[in-house]
Image (cartoon, rainbow, N blue to C red):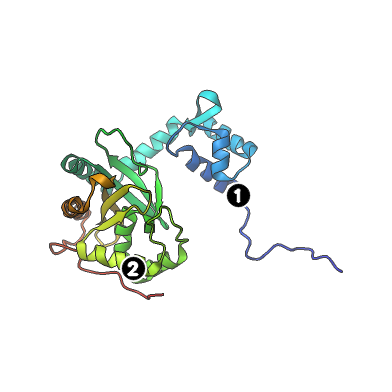
C-alpha cells in the first residue's frame, strides 16, 4: 500500500502563529485573581511552559508583563498605561461612568458597562458598592452574549440576519443550570426583553446571580455596548427587577443620547428581533 504523503485533514485548524500565542498569553495574564503563575497561564492557553515563558520574558522586557512573587507574573506598567489611554479615549465609556455611579448609588448593586467582541460580551467598567462578596463580572471578564444580561441586551438590538448568525454559529454551551442553550428559547427571551425595554438574566452565567441590562446605541442605532445592574438572587427578586429594569433602561438611553442615538419613544424598545426560526 502506498502511504499518503499528506494526511492532514482539510478541516483541521491551522497551527497558531507567534502573534496568536502572544495574544492568548496576554489575555490569560490579565484574568482576575492575578498575579498568575507560569503553569496556570500554560493551562489556560493550552501552550507549553517553555512557550509561555518565552512570551512572558519578551513582554516583561517591553513593560507589558511584570514578574511577581513566587515566579508569577502580573500586567506590566506599559500595558496598564495603554489600557488606561484606550479607555480614556472612549466617548461611550466617559458617558457611562457617571451613569454607572448613579445606578450603584440608587440600587445598592454593582453597575456594569460591557461591549461586544464577536460572540462575547466584554466588561470594561464597573461601579461597585462596598460588599462582602464580589461578582465574577468584572472589567476584563468575558461572557457569551447568550448567557449574560449585557449580551442579551446587545442581541436585542442586532439586525435579524446578524442575530441569526450569532445564535446559530455560536456553541451554546450551558454556563450554569439555567442557561438558555436553545435558539428558539433565546428568541422568546429576546422578544420579552424588547417588549420590556431591558433584558433579565436569571442565573444564566453563574448560579445565584441575576442581572438586568439595556443596550447602548450609537447615532446609527447600532448597539455599541450595554449597561447592567447585577446582584445576588436573594437581593434581586421579581419586585426589585421591575424597579431596576426601567432605571437601567433610562440609564442606557441617557448614554445613547450622548452618542447621538435617535430619541426612542417612552417605554419599551420599539423594534423586536426577527429572522428565521431555524
- Where residue 250 appears, x then y in whole percent? 17, 53
Disc on the earlier residue, 1 or 2: 1
**Left or right: 102 as drawn, with respect to 167:** left
- Where residue 253 appears, x then y in whole percent? 19, 55
- Where residue 225 appears, x then y in whole percent? 30, 53
State the count of labels. Answer: 2
- Where residue 75 appears, x then y in whole percent? 46, 33
- Which residue is the site of mark 1? 17
Quarter-of-image position of residue 152: bottom left
- Which residue is the site of mark 2? 187
**Left or right: 230 as drawn, with respect to 23:** left
Q: Nearer the viewer, residue 165 or 188?
A: 188
- Per the image, label 2 sits on a secondary structure element best described as helix
**Left or right: 197 as drawn, with respect to 30:** left
Q: Which mark is residue 158?
A: none
Q: Residue at x 42, y 58 (%)?
A: 119
- Per the image, label 1 sits on a secondary structure element best described as loop
Q: Nearer the viewer, residue 74 or 241?
A: 241
Mark yes or no: residue 63 visible: no
Quarter-of-image position of residue 103: top left
How far apart marks 1 and 2 lie (CA) works out to: 37 Å
Badge 2 crowding class, 10 Å Cα cut-off, few under 14, some 14 to 19, many 20 or more, is: many
The correct choice, above or below, for 231 with respect to 170 in the image is above
Q: Nearer the viewer, residue 71 or 57?
A: 71
Q: Residue at x 40, y 51 (%)?
A: 143
For this orientation, the residue located farthest to the right is 1
Amino acid at each position: 500500500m502506498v502511504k499518503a504523503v499528506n494526511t492532514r485533514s482539510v478541516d483541521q485548524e491551522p497551527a497558531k502563529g507567534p502573534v496568536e500565542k502572544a495574544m492568548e498569553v496576554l489575555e490569560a495574564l490579565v484574568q482576575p485573581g492575578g498575579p498568575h503563575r507560569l503553569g496556570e497561564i500554560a493551562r489556560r492557553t493550552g501552550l507549553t511552559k517553555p512557550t509561555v515563558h518565552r512570551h512572558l520574558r519578551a513582554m516583561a522586557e517591553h513593560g507589558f508583563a511584570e514578574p511577581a512573587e513566587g515566579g508569577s507574573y502580573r500586567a506590566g506598567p506599559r500595558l496598564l498605561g495603554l489600557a488606561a489611554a484606550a479607555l480614556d479615549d472612549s466617548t461611550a465609556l466617559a458617558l457611562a461612568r457617571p451613569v454607572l455611579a448613579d445606578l450603584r448609588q440608587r440600587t445598592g448593586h454593582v453597575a456594569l458597562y460591557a461591549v461586544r467582541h464577536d460572540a462575547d460580551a466584554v466588561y470594561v467598567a464597573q461601579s461597585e458598592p462596598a460588599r462582602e462578596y464580589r461578582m465574577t463580572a468584572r472589567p476584563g471578564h468575558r461572557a457569551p452574549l447568550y448567557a449574560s444580561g449585557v449580551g442579551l441586551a446587545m442581541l436585542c438590538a442586532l439586525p435579524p440576519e446578524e442575530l441569526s448568525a450569532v445564535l446559530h454559529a455560536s456553541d451554546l454551551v450551558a454556563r450554569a443550570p439555567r442557561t438558555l442553550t436553545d435558539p428558539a428559547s433565546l428568541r422568546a427571551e429576546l422578544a420579552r426583553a424588547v417588549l420590556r425595554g431591558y433584558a433579565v438574566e436569571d442565573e444564566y452565567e453563574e448560579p445565584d446571580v441575576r442581572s438586568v441590562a439595556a443596550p447602548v446605541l450609537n447615532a446609527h442605532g447600532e448597539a455599541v455596548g450595554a449597561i447592567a445592574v447585577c446582584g445576588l438572587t436573594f437581593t434581586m427578586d421579581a419586585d426589585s427587577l421591575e424597579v431596576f429594569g426601567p432605571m437601567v433602561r433610562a440609564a442606557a438611553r441617557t448614554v445613547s443620547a450622548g452618542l447621538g442615538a435617535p430619541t426612542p419613544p417612552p417605554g419599551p424598545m420599539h423594534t423586536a428581533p426577527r429572522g428565521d426560526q431555524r
